[in-house]
Image (cartoon, rainbow, N blue to C red):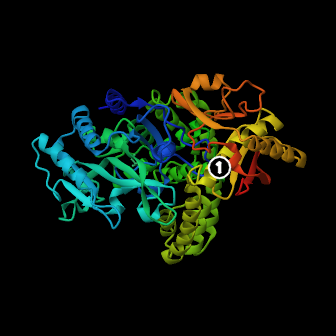
């Protein structure tokens, strides 16, 4: 079965069951500079899972593109990829376990044709605050019994602790920050059986092999999260006002399972890319495990780079641009192990197959293919040249030690194994100890940074954060009135202490401009304007003058927040000051905001400024 059929069948299946299809958001969340990439289907839906009303209703379905950098070390096996597509359906306080689990089973068995005897499921085993998910066990037993399978616990249904069967963006309950939603989940695994080429070195024959074992025989194909809790500041979990379902099924893996092929890299989502790499390197994908692994890494990383470039990410030393740069470099280094060096621009030849794979789902990759190719070639060429210089330098070093090996990793992205291989070919031994120490410090630093980056646009939905969110709308509009309509929001991050707002503007703000902006906002606060929202079509919202983030793909129906009375005649004391497409939440009246003050204004990059501002705690 082709991946496009899997995607289409899934969307149709859930549309038939009352779901509204919503578009995939871009890889880079446009209104949220604190999360580098969308890494799950639910990410753009957080406000609605927390209780905001979604303009398209309570049942949603889509296919969302995503990037999971945390899987980078796993890429090279049969199933991990950094770029992925997640088929998702959501119940926002509507249906729950007894509808969700039978539907998913029906979809994978009837629509994709998976043999029920090859399916295994897992549920949450419980912890000290949330009980074991016996309800899901019962539902699964009934589902399997309807197809003549007696589903016993520990044979077909397995219960695991939070490390395996709890889902939130931060992981287990202990790791969730305040305000983060999460819940127990139920995963489904497909048994590929004893396909020997996969299991030569795997522990599958051991008695310990089970669905959640990492050997590759059982592949997790989808996950239904019962998102019904939110983390509190005191560390406890509170029931959300609504019980949600957040389902995610990896398109790559569902396609692999529907073809009974354990290798996602030989499905139509990768095979054409691999073929080009085979041609360029004059090696076969199946030659030896080392070759297979390197080809998978090159194919995955370059595909991911192409998709990032298509969404406007450019190589740089910061944020998303740095991730992109790392991926291209890593791909080139692994390509080098396949003999692909010298003409580093070869990666440009992989753009066309990627564009063809996604021509229906993401046509922008096709329209931008030429531009993407040039950018990718340029980046590859520059790195290739500096790598060649670096390698020449290494040859001059008499004894390569662990610290130097780490420098190679830091400057060129050389993985340990590759450095060792360089060194070995020259009869040297490099001590891993020193490398490992420096590497760990580096990893700890990036993890801390990543944690800081993790939170969404709103740190939580506390009263202070919600107030500052409304203040952000006032600021956005005030900037446009005082500085001009060229001002566009580039990002926003709000904590209980302050708001941070990034916007396009070519020059530093003068003290006078800052004063004018503050005064204008404080006037709106004094007027105690009502804040309200209405649900309308995207086209009507724009016609009405609502602000929207340029380039973001919106569903047909959107929520528009107005500050001021939408029905008051324009120019009157209470007429609308700001109108913006936004998921919420907001305060009900501006009067409770307190005094607005800009604390700091600075340059963020060419043509982009950043403002930090607060409101006083008391109105
Ligand atoms: N949020 C869950 C996941 O990403 C299910 O959609 O796996």
Q: Quadrant of residue 161?
A: bottom left
> Residue 106 location in percent, x, y?
23, 36
Q: Is residue 603 above or below residue 53?
A: below
Q: Residue at x 73, y 34 (%)?
A: 577
Q: Is residue 77 above or below residue 523?
A: below
Does residue 472 appear in this view?
no
Quadrant showing the N terminus? top left
Q: Residues within 10 Å of mark 1 (few under 14, many from 20)?
A: many
Q: Residue at x 76, y 52 (%)?
A: 595
Left or right: where 236 falls relative to 488: left
Left or right: where 181 falls relative to 573: left
Q: Nearer the viewer, residue 616 or 278?
A: 616
Q: Nearer the viewer, residue 497 or 289?
A: 497
Q: Nearer the viewer, residue 416 or 78?
A: 78
Instruction: Judge: label 1 CB < 8 Å from ligand 1.
Output: no
> Residue 315 location in percent, x, y?
63, 46
Q: Is residue 40 above or below residue 444?
A: above
Left or right: where 326 falls relative to 607: left
Q: Quadrant of residue 586?
A: top right
Q: Quadrant of residue 544?
A: top right
Left or right: where 263 falls relative to 302: left
> Residue 459 location in percent, x, y?
58, 54
Tag 1's secondary structure? helix
Give the total of numbered labels: 1
Q: Mark 1 = which residue? A: 467
Q: Nearer the viewer, residue 502 or 215?
A: 502
> Residue 270 location in percent, x, y?
40, 39
């Amino acid at each position: 079965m082709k991946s496009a059929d899997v995607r289409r069948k899934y969307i149709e299946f859930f549309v038939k069951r009352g779901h509204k299809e919503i578009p995939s958001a871009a890889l880079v969340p446009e209104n949220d500079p604190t999360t580098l990439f969308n890494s799950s289907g639910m990410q753009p839906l957080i406000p609605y899972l927390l209780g905001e009303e979604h303009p398209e209703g309570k049942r949603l379905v889509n296919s969302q593109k995503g990037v999971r950098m945390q899987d980078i070390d796993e890429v090279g096996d049969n199933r991990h990829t950094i770029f992925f597509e997640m088929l998702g359906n959501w119940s926002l306080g509507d249906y729950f376990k007894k509808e969700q689990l039978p539907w998913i089973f029906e979809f994978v068995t009837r629509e994709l044709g998976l043999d029920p005897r090859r399916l295994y499921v897992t549920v949450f085993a419980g912890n000290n605050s949330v009980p074991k998910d016996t309800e899901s066990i019962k539902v699964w037993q009934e589902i399997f019994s309807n197809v003549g399978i007696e589903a016993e616990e520990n044979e077909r249904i397995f219960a695991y602790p939070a490390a395996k069967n709890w889902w939130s963006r931060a992981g287990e309950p202990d790791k969730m920050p305040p305000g983060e939603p999460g819940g127990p989940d139920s995963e489904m695994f497909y048994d590929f059986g004893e396909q020997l080429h996969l299991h030569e070195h795997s522990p599958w024959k051991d008695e310990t092999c089970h669905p959640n074992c990492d050997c590759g025989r059982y592949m997790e194909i989808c996950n239904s999260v019962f998102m019904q809790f939110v983390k509190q500041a005191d560390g406890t979990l509170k029931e959300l006002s609504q019980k949600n379902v957040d389902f995610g099924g990896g398109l790559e893996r569902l396609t692999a399972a529907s073809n009974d092929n354990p290798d996602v890299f030989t499905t139509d989502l990768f095979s054409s890319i691999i073929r080009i790499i085979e041609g360029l390197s004059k090696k076969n994908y199946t030659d030896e495990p080392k070759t297979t692994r390197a080809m998978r890494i090159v194919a995955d990383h370059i595909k991911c780079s192409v998709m990032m470039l298509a969404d406007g990410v450019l190589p740089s030393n910061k944020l998303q641009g740095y991730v992109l740069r790392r991926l291209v470099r890593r791909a080139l280094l692994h390509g080098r192990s396949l003999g692909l060096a010298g003409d580093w621009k070869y990666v440009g030849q992989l753009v066309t197959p990627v564009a063809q794979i996604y021509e229906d789902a993401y046509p922008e990759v096709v329209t931008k293919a030429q531009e993407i190719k040039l950018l990718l070639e340029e980046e590859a060429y520059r790195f290739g040249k500096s790598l060649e210089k670096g390698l020449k330098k290494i040859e001059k070093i008499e004894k390569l030690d662990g610290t130097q090996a780490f420098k190679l990793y830091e400057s060129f992205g050389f993985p340990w194994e590759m450095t060792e291989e360089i060194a070995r070919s020259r009869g040297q031994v490099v001590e891993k100890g020193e490398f490992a120490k420096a590497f760990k410090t580096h990893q700890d630093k990036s993890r801390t940074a990543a944690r800081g980056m993790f939170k969404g646009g709103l740190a939580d939905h506390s009263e202070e954060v919600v107030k500052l969110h409304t203040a952000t709308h006032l600021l956005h509009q005030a900037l446009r009135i005082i500085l001009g309509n060229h001002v566009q929001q580039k990002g926003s991050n709000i904590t209980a202490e302050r708001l941070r707002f990034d916007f396009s503007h070519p020059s530093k703000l003068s003290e006078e401009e800052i004063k004018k902006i503050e005064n204008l906002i404080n006037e709106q606060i004094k007027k105690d304007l009502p804040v309200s929202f209405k649900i309308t079509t995207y086209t009507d919202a724009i016609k009405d003058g609502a602000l929207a983030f340029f380039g973001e793909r919106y569903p047909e129906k959107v929520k528009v927040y107005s500050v001021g009375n939408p029905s008051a005649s324009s120019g009157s004391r209470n007429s609308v000051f700001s109108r913006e497409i936004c998921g919420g939440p907001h305060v009900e009246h501006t009067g409770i905001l307190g005094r607005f003050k800009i604390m700091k204004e600075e340059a963020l990059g060419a043509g982009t400024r950043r403002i930090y501002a607060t409101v006083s705690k008391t109105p």
